Image: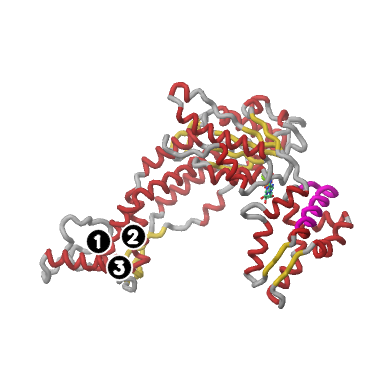
């Protein structure tokens, strides 16, 4: 467990910088939190267990990068990382997902991760096994040389008396060589292909708050309808990859995978609770959604404080899972959360509203910057889309202006504004003769001024 490399807080921040403009404090906090996971692992046991994670709440208006930070962090953290919307949970007994389901999802993620890791470890062995199985298929009437693994396909074991065992051995070696040299690519083999039965009816059950039941059902159905085998003729390459997958499944020690996954979840799992303000309000009568919201907080509390949750992979203790929550907190404050929950999120960071300077950078700097996306899209039509700097400045300025006049939706405004500016071009792109298109400040204004002048119109269109 101690061998995983942890990014230093500085590394984490510079990774996040590639995608998110500004919001330095939030980046710093999550980077420290991430590193603290690793630090705790280095501490010796009795004290280690005492070190509780310092959960974080990110507070900031909509569209300033809260969710984006979480998404990017998920890619960086080499630990199970789950992002959930707090608003989709409801109190136990109500329609919606129960809070414990996030722990079950987190473990499932961890299982998938561990399985992937294990897979790369058995890769070589599986390759070898697949090769032997394929040779069995290619040479069905040959006696198997002693010691070669006899797994999978039943080749009837038919021994034909024409060849002596060592001759058979050498034929097999010859085939093996041809196989490796890719000389058998065009050959076909017949093999049994197993296909998991699809179970469309299961969909009916999802999102009804019966997650555990759903997964149990899935398992149960899996047993009732066992995997179906079907004889098919396949090209060698395709057969090989199927055989290899089968070999991988055979070689992976699922008990070990599960054990590792649970340990990883407990020791380094991270849950990002988005939109926590949606469950924050405490005032109100005591019926309707209010009950449900406070109920969700009550349900959430033991999980954040440390509880044991039963999952289909085993029991999971939540004491050391890190929670990062985020919310706009427009209508309410973090102090509207039930006090026990507030206490469990000691670190608060604020994200700032974005203005035209940030917009300009967001449009141009990130690796996936919006303008780069549009340029790439137009390229597919053979058009060189060029954004003049004054054009980009104008887009940033107008987006900020619309945010001010109507509603501040942060960087999301850039999407709507850009879409409008480029609408004509998008529509006509395939038919345009001129293959270079420059977006100037004038062009931007031309496309937008009528709309922006009319406040009501901009509410609808931008
Ligand atoms: N600081 C930022 N830097 C770069 N892109 C941003 C920034 N803030 C928001 N965005 C972009 O705006 C959109 C909405 O951001 P998001 O993080 O989902 O907002 P929220 O803060 O409401 O969760 C995303 O496409 C995101 O990439
Ligand atoms: Mg968000």
Q: Residue at x 18, y 66 (%)?
A: 142
- The quadrant holding residue 445 is bottom right
Please state if 295 lies on the left or on the right of 259 as rendered. right
Distance (Cα) linking label 1 and label 3: 26 Å
Please state if 335 lies on the left or on the right of 36 as rendered. right
The residue segment tinted magenta is 392-409
* Residue, disc 1: 154
Query: Residue 306, how many percent across, how many down?
Result: 54, 28
Query: Residue 365, how many percent across, how many down?
Result: 66, 52
Ligand 1 within 8 A of label 1's CB? no
Q: Dot 2: what SS?
A: helix
> Which quadrant of the rendered structure holds the N terminus?
top left
Within 10 Å of disc 3 (Cα), the crowding (few <14, some 14-19, many 20+) is: few
Question: Is label 3 in contact with label 2 (beta carbons under 8 Å)?
Answer: no
Within 10 Å of disc 1 (Cα), the crowding (few <14, some 14-19, many 20+) is: few
Q: Residue at x 45, y 43 (%)?
A: 111
> Which quadrant of the rendered structure holds the C terminus?
bottom right
Query: Residue 227, how many percent across, how many down?
Result: 38, 56
């Amino acid at each position: 467990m101690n061998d995983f490399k942890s990014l230093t807080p500085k590394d984490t921040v510079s990774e996040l910088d590639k995608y998110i403009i500004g919001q330095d404090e939030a980046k710093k906090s999550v980077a420290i939190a991430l590193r603290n996971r690793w630090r705790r692992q280095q501490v010796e046991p009795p004290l280690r267990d005492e070190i509780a994670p310092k959960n974080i709440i990110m507070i900031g208006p909509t569209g300033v990068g809260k969710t984006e930070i979480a998404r990017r962090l998920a890619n960086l953290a080499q630990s199970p990382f789950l992002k959930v919307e707090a608003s989709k949970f409801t109190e136990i007994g109500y329609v919606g997902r129960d809070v414990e389901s996030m722990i079950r999802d987190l473990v499932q993620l961890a299982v998938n991760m561990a399985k992937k890791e294990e897979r790369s470890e058995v890769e070589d062995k599986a390759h070898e096994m697949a090769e032997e199985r394929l040779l069995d298929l290619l040479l069905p009437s040959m006696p198997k040389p002693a010691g070669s693994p006899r797994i999978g396909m039943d080749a009837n074991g038919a021994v034909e008396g024409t060849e002596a065992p060592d001759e058979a051995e050498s034929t097999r070696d010859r085939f093996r060589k041809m196989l490796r040299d890719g000389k058998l690519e065009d050959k076909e083999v017949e093999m049994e292909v197993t296909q998991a039965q699809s179970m469309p009816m299961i969909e009916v059950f999802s999102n009804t708050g019966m997650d555990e039941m759903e997964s149990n059902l899935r398992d149960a159905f899996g047993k009732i309808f066992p995997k179906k085998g079907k004889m098919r003729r396949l090209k060698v390459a395709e057969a090989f990859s199927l055989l290899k997958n089968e070999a991988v499944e055979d070689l992976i020690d699922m008990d070990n995978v599960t054990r590792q996954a649970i340990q990883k979840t407990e020791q380094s799992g991270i849950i990002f609770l988005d939109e926590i303000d949606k469950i924050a309000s405490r005032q109100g009568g005591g019926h309707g959604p209010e009950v449900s919201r406070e109920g969700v907080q009550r349900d959430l509390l033991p999980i954040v404080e440390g509880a044991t949750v039963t999952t289909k992979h085993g029991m999971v203790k939540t004491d050391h899972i890190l929670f990062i929550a985020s919310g706009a907190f427009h209508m309410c404050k973090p102090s509207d959360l039930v006090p026990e929950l507030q206490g469990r999120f000691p670190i608060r960071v604020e994200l700032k509203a974005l203005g035209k300077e940030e917009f300009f950078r967001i449009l141009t700097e990130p690796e996936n910057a919006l303008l780069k996306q549009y340029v790439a899209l137009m390229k597919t039509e053979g058009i060189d889309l060029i954004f003049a700097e004054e054009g980009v400045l104008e887009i940033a300025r107008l987006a900020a202006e619309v945010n001010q006049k109507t509603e501040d939706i942060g960087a999301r405004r850039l999407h709507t504004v850009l879409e409008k500016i480029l609408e004509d071009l998008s529509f006509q792109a395939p038919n345009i003769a001129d293959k270079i298109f420059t977006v100037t400040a004038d062009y931007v204004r031309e496309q937008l001024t009528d709309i922006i002048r009319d406040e009501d119109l901009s509410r609808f269109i931008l």
